[in-house]
Amino acid sequence: MPLELKTLYQHFASHLEAQWIMRPENAGLLFDFVKKHPVKKILDLGTGIGCSVAIIALALKTKGEEDFKMDSVEQYDKCIKLANELIPEELKKNVTIHKSNAVLWQTDKIPYQHFSIYDSLPDGDYDLILNDGPGPWAENGNYIDLSNGTIIKLLLENRLKPNTLIAFDGRFVALKTIERYFSENFYLFQPAPNGTSLNIIQRKDNLVKFEDEEMKYMTEFGYFKGM
């Protein structure tokens, strides 16, 4: 019998490390989205134990895609090992999991803020990026949990081709940051329905434009007058 989404999701949800997989309602949205849209080159930021990788691969196979390419990036060896064990063999074709450490990153355009990024990414001309990492990590006795800045870095480096779709599994702070500073560079392609948290944006075909929308609003509102 062909593998079904419900069975696949339960396969991951029953694991001891299942607290890190995407919520079932988001899994369904992602599966349906991939089935309905012409995506064949995918970058998954945050492999975890492999649930999102498997969901995307199943959606692609369900609609008959055989020559797709998926790169997935993960910071923890433990997760990579579990993902390789848990992703069904029939879904591993054309999928590569890459090890990449999580590091701090900052851009001069957004002073006073640090972001988490992966220190290396595979090269690729992706149709869809799932933004769900890096996750938190410990460094010098400190717990580091920051907004993800990988999409911003790729944008500033002109590594997001026009029409690239970017799905955010939660990650509201990262999405809010893009909305604040780079809203002119993206469309809101598919907002998360009520009760879900999978928002999808799309890269516009334009030059990178930076503007602090909140600063602009507060200045026009007169908030800073007299200070």
Image (spheres, rainbow, N blue to C red):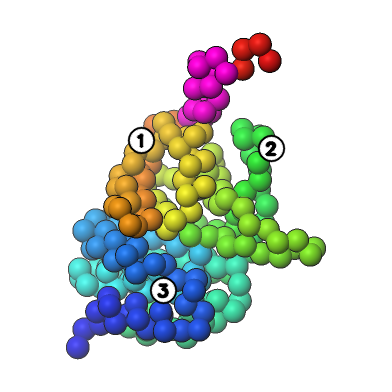
Q: CA distance from mark 3 to mark 1?
A: 31 Å
Q: Say which quadrant the N terminus sits in.
A: bottom left
Q: Specify start and end residues of the magenta stretch as a single range.
A: 209-223
Q: Position of residue 214 (x, y in %)?
A: 52, 28
Mark 3 and mark 2 lie on one chain; the one further toward the N terminus is: 3
Looking at the image, residue 177 lies above or below residue 8? above
Q: Judge depth for marks 3 and 1 and give the one in front.
A: 3
- Residue 205's disc is 1
Disc 2 target residue: 112
Res. 127 in view: no
The answer to whether the residue labelled 1 contacts the one labelled 2, judged by CB atoms less than 8 Å apart, is no
Mark 1 and mark 2 lie on one chain; the one further toward the N terminus is: 2
* Residue shown at the point (55%, 14%) measured from the top left: 222
Q: Quadrant of residue 11?
A: bottom left
In what element is the residue under mark 1? loop
- Residue 51's disc is 3
Residue 50 as seen in the image, left or right of residue 133: left
Q: Position of residue 142 (x, y in %)?
A: 75, 61
Q: How many residues crowd around disc 2 within 10 Å: few (fewer than 14), some, or many (20 or more)?
A: few
Magenta stretch mostly in which secondary structure? Answer: helix
Asked if residue 220 is among those painted magenta in the image, a careful observer would answer yes
